[in-house]
Image: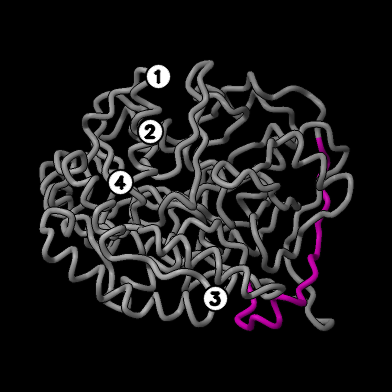
Amino acid sequence: MLLGAQWGDEGKGKATDLLGGSVDYVVRYQGGNNAGHTVVVGDQKYALHLLPSGILSPGCTPVIGNGVVIDPKVLFSELDGLNARGVDTSRLLVSGNAHLITPYHQTLDKVSERFLGKRKIGTTGRGIGPTYADKINRQGIRVQDLFDESILRQKVEAALDQKNQLLAKLYNRRAIGVDEITGELLGYADRLRPYVADTTLLLNQAIDEDKVVLLEGGQGTLLDVDHGTYPFVTSSNPTAGGACTGAGIGPTKISRVIGILKAYTTRVGAGPFPTELEDEDGEALRRIGGEFGVTTGRDRRCGWFDAVIARYATRVNGLTDFFLTKLDVLTGWERIPVCVAYEIDGRRVEELPYSQTDFHHAKPVYEYLPGWSEDITKARSVKDLPINAQRYVQALEDFSGAPISAIGVGPGRDETIQINSFL
């Protein structure tokens, strides 16, 4: 399993792609097109939002699991874009139990966020939250509903009975027609049908046959709806437990949990961020690291590495090891701060505060490590790194509570140091 150990955007796409040639299935288990992965293969760059990164690996079967919410329009747009670039997408499988994002979910997402004003969460406006809300409220529409027009219409009618009242009376928006939504969704049925399968059954059979299944999370640990910086979180569970429900695989079948960890810290959207930099260093990290959202294009907030968050991710996910990404971005700093604890009301705190109030008031306690100026993008072993880069990696491993098994030293697929084999 691969998942984000910070606030997302850690480089999960590269890690998944690196493993793609060694695995049989790559499974997205939560989120929707509010997540984004950038994968660089040779001189080609691919921006994926909904599709699993494994779709770029020949021979690998990419799977969209039951825990994902799917915008069919986005799905087919991504598929068409990859097909036009010569990527074979025919192996894709989609769970019939995955829920669908509809136009009314997107409308509600946008108007409710505007309605919140200064209290807004910072959503992508893609309809993710309202779709998950309908799922929990048992008003959701699943992929399999597209193949039974009667059931589909009944579900759309039930959903719009309530939502049109909300749109008209609270937000002063026009009502949405049942025929409009039903017709649009039915228009996707024939094209989607060949991809749809009982993915839970197929994945469990694959594991029983000793095939390798890689579970790929979107977003990151600190955006988990249960374990993140609530309410500034996503609407699903990117943590390891979410993989079990979102893919239909029991926890005893998961043998390894790898956390993707950026060599510094970023987040998109509102919410607390103790190590955030609003100075020249923050701007330099953003510029050098290309820290702009793959999905939204928004500037990412940037800050120094936060070991408190890394330790928390190790604990709540049961991480076995880390993939450290973007180490090359730190080249050029004379010294590099690392947050090892927080100061809260005069107290030193070394674990993530339980209280939301405390976390909002947390100030970073830094240790300073010597930097390096040498180009590290050609390094293919730890010994190839400058001694100060080696010490930085070792310090992050010591602070974070799990071994580092690989290091990204550049954006390319081959610009990686593998310390321990992933498989």
Tag 1 or tag 2, which sits nearer the N-term?
Answer: 2
| Disc 3 to disc 4: CB gap under 8 Å | no
In depth, the one of 250 and 268 nearer the eye is 268
Of badges 3 and 2, the one in the foreground is: 3
**Disc 3 versus disc 2: distance between alpha carbons?**
47 Å
Q: Which mark is residue 307?
A: none
Question: Are the residues flagged by discs 4 and 2 in contact, CB closer than 8 Å?
Answer: no
Residue at numbered disc 1: 85
Q: What residue would you read off at disc 3?
A: 171
Tell me the CA gap for discs 1 and 4.
Answer: 22 Å
The front one of 24 and 167 is: 167
Q: Amino acid at mark 2?
A: Leu
Reading the image, the residue beneath label 4 is 27
Label 1 packing within 10 angstroms: few (<14), some (14-19), many (20+): few
Q: Amino acid at mark 3?
A: Tyr
Query: Which of the 4 image quadrants contains residue 81?
Result: top left
Q: What range is drawn magenta here?
A: 352-371
Considering the numbered disc 3 on the image, is that residue within a helix, a strand or a loop? loop
